[in-house]
Amino acid sequence: MSYRTTPSVDYVEDVSPGSGALPPRAWYASSDARSLSLNGSWRLRVSATADAEDESFAEEGYDAGNWAEVTVPGHWVLQGDGAFGSPIYTNHLYPFPVDPPYVPTENPTGDHLRVFDLPTDWPSDGGAVLRFDGVESCARVWLNGTELGEFKGSRLAHEFTVGELLKPGRNVLAVRVHQWSAGSYLEDQDQWWLPGIFRDVTLLHRPAGSPGDFFVHASYDHTTGEGTLRVDSDVEGRVTVPALGIDVATGEPITVAVEPWTAETPRLYDGVLATEGERVPLRIGFRTVVLEDGLVKVNGRAILFRGVNRHEWHPRHGRALDLETMREDVLLMKRHNLNAVRTSHYPPHPAFLDLCDEYGLWVIDECDLETHGFVEQDWRDNPVDDERWTPALLDRAARMVERDKNHPSIVFWSLGNEAGTGRGLTAMAEWIHGRDPERLVHYEGDWNCRDTDVYSRMYASHEEVAGIGQRLDGGTHKRRELPFIQCEYGHAMGNGPGGLADYQELFEKHERLQGGFIWEWIDHGVEHAELGYAYGGDFGEELHDGNFVCDGLVFPDRTPSPGLIEYKKVIEPVLIEGDGTNGTVWVTNKHDFADLSALAFEWSCQVDGETVESGSLAVPALAPGESAEVKLPEPPVDGRGGERQWTVRALLADDTSWAAKGHVVAWGQFAAGARPLPSIPATDRPVRDGDRITLGPAGFDARTGALLSIGGVAVGAAPRLDVWRATTDNDDGAEWQTDTRYGMLWRTLGLHRMRHRLVSVEAGDDALTVRTRVAPAAREVGLDTVYRWTSDGERLRLTVSVTPEGDWTVPLPRLGVRFGLPEADRVEWFGGGPGEAYPDTRAASMVGRWQSTVDGLQTPYVRPQENGARADVRWVELGGLRIEGDPEFWFTARRWTTEQLDAARHRTDLTAGDTVWVNLDHGLHGIGSQSCGPGPLPQYFLKAEPAEFSFVFSTTE
Ligand code: IPT
């Protein structure tokens, strides 16, 4: 005989979306219906299994005596200092056996209790609903001891009717949340697994005669300049839009002249839907999205997505974001020229979409669906191709579309991410197309585009994208008719992504290519006392994907990383080119809709990087796509014979909602003459005195030829050839990459442990020459390296000649010299800045005079790696030395060695030593995007080939 002593938890492993919840509907904040937020402190009890505790906690009068407290919205594993379990990070592997729809018996379960008083003036008429905006992954709900139902679909809203159950005074809401459920199989997104009630819980009064649901249809006819509004509502009422003089019945269309909504000109009209019982505020944006001539067009024009993939992330609160954090994301995006967001990989908190409407961002709203882990078994048993799961998929599609359908910013519905292909996806697409024919459908996983209105790919190489742009890619007939986007590209993990400018060039060149979305917005680092930011494995997970979760354009605290600065420059909506020698500037408006009237232009002229004059530049209010030639003023008269250049900036002419007047939107720089190179006649002669050699201001070790000092500046470690860098995530490449992963090959070859063999030290008539061979242990290849020192008595010139020997089959990470200074802090340079740059991430590097400290030069990648190089440096001053380059060089300085940087796993592993290590590089290898996508393009390879470069040293005293 068998019997159960435990509560029934069958619903947890049931493929159905749940039971008891109301059908989905539009999400809004009412003007006059009451609501009560149930956010705040809740009581919590975490059990190890779904059925460890019975359901008595939901009964009225239950005493939660020793239960813990938890903040809702929140994730219990991010509260209580580990007392309630820890986060788990996996990319696509399920952290439990693939045994659908079953989940492990160990299934952390959080029983939540919230006692609340119904406000004394809470209306007694009508009904009420209880809304959950997000619970991961499965919840069962009781109010005052009565069960309301259970649901899955973590990032979707679920509502229950509760009017009958509410009581005056004290009410008890009980929610049992299971970390794992059948729903987890549909939620295999690349992110932390974080159980909990992580979005708002709200009690909403539903007055009698209030709408259940409504759908705002607001289209724009670009041929007439008119918009047509029709608001469908299940409860009749009137729709008013005062600014447009609109006052019509629901269901009735009205056409009037309007200003359209676009991401660049997000014109919203405030309106009201008034039914007998409620006034619902409307924010209406008129725009029409169509697929026409093989292009996505809005209001008659093809658009170009300059987008990013956004996960919801906060370093302390996980996916529980407050409004200010959401706004910060939107403001940062707008300030960095982004115009689009893909809500990877689930519908965001609805307030985020309000912000997209308000500030202007195109949105691909993505369904909460990913079954990526099934790829491990060749997609066998994939829920999206198994009819038993189709109701759950359709439920998810409906909950997204119904909740979000009134946002003008949404142009695409996305079925989900990385879920293979199958009948369930087709069913979702059919349902969505039927329910909302006024938007398009996106899904990346089906390259035949059976169900989609756009051909979408991720991480396609430049070469492949170029082919697609030229329609050389073939594919199904359907696909050949469709426009192309990269829903993910430019993997922003660690240093990088490289190659963005090259992609943008393609997007702008070929009509079919309608842009892309960088992967991704933010590093999902978890704030951690000892580690700085934690990533996969830091919580002892047995299965994890390390720092693959830190691949954003902003750091966990939302400080922009250099990748965002680069992207901002690459996607500038205004192109400023020029010829500095004849004073001509060409300005092109690359917006899709806006003219240039919101911008003011400024010119400035620099001599040796210092601005000597500036003024405003009159540029016509060009329409999108137009260009104009503008003349710069006469070059300023200046006696100095330095290097001259012009800089032209496009700035906001007035304050906007997202940035202040003067905010720089775009810029261009053009040389007005060649740089005078440092010329040092070799007039001095090396003089030997015992174990020392003196040459001009410098002293050398006579035996080794090592530089010891220049003037009063002691050199802690003499300059010598350096080819190693602490490999970046993009150097290392993803484990599944079949292309060449140089990070690994460099290590195999031993470039991180080069040996230096001294061949000779020759003190000649006009030079000290030190010959060496630099090579990795265990290998035959080497770099024949000659250091030639000369001086004019005051300054010291080092010329390094490098000749590779043997068969070099890999590029070099870097090529230059490294030396150590005992003391250095302030740094000033003339060259590219203010931030870091590498050969394929240098678009945003602006030539000028820059200052920093050594610490300020560091880019604090969550997993430490090569960073902080400054490009095109003419000269740099630090630690009492001035170093000029012939030619320009890459400059890096840090308080730890490359080896220490290479060994560090977290920021906190890096501690300053007593030497500042300086790298002066003639060349650096490109960065690329191989942590998930393609490596650097061949033109950014640092080939092992003969090279010669010089530096001129002097003291600054
Ligand atoms: C792609 C995923 O869609 C995304 O969620 C993320 O994991 C990204 O990669 C890498 O960070 S899938 C990959 C197999 C191309």
Image (tube, rainbow, N blue to C red):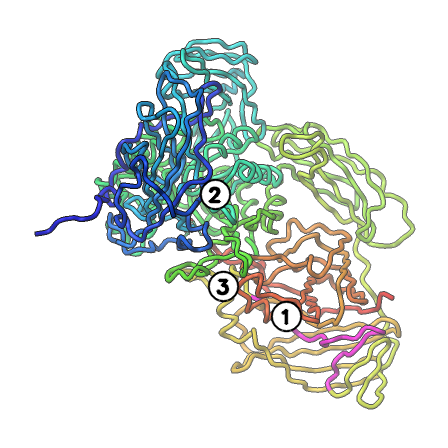
- Image disc number at residue 897: 1
Above or below: residue 942 compared with residue 523: below
Mark 3, residue position: 732
Q: Earlier in the sequence, mark 3 or mark 1?
A: 3
Q: Residues within 10 Å of mark 3 (few under 14, many from 20)?
A: many
* Residue 480 is at least partly visible in this image: no
Q: Secondary structure at mark 2?
A: loop
Exactly how many numbered labels are in the figure? 3
Above or below: residue 377 compared with residue 72: below
Identity, as a three-letter code, of the amino acid under mark 2: Glu
Question: 855 or 434: nearer the eye?
Answer: 855
Residue at 60%, 51% in the rendered image: 561
Residue at 62%, 63% in the rendered image: 924
- In the rendered image, the residue lying farthest to the bottom is 690
Label 3 vs label 1: CA separation? 19 Å
Label 1 vs label 2: CA separation? 35 Å
Image location of residue 593, percent across then percent down:
58, 28
Q: Secondary structure at mark 1?
A: loop
Q: Residues within 10 Å of mark 2 (few under 14, many from 20)?
A: many
Magenta span of residues: 704-726
Image location of residue 46, percent across then percent down:
35, 49
Q: Earlier in the sequence, mark 1 or mark 2?
A: 2
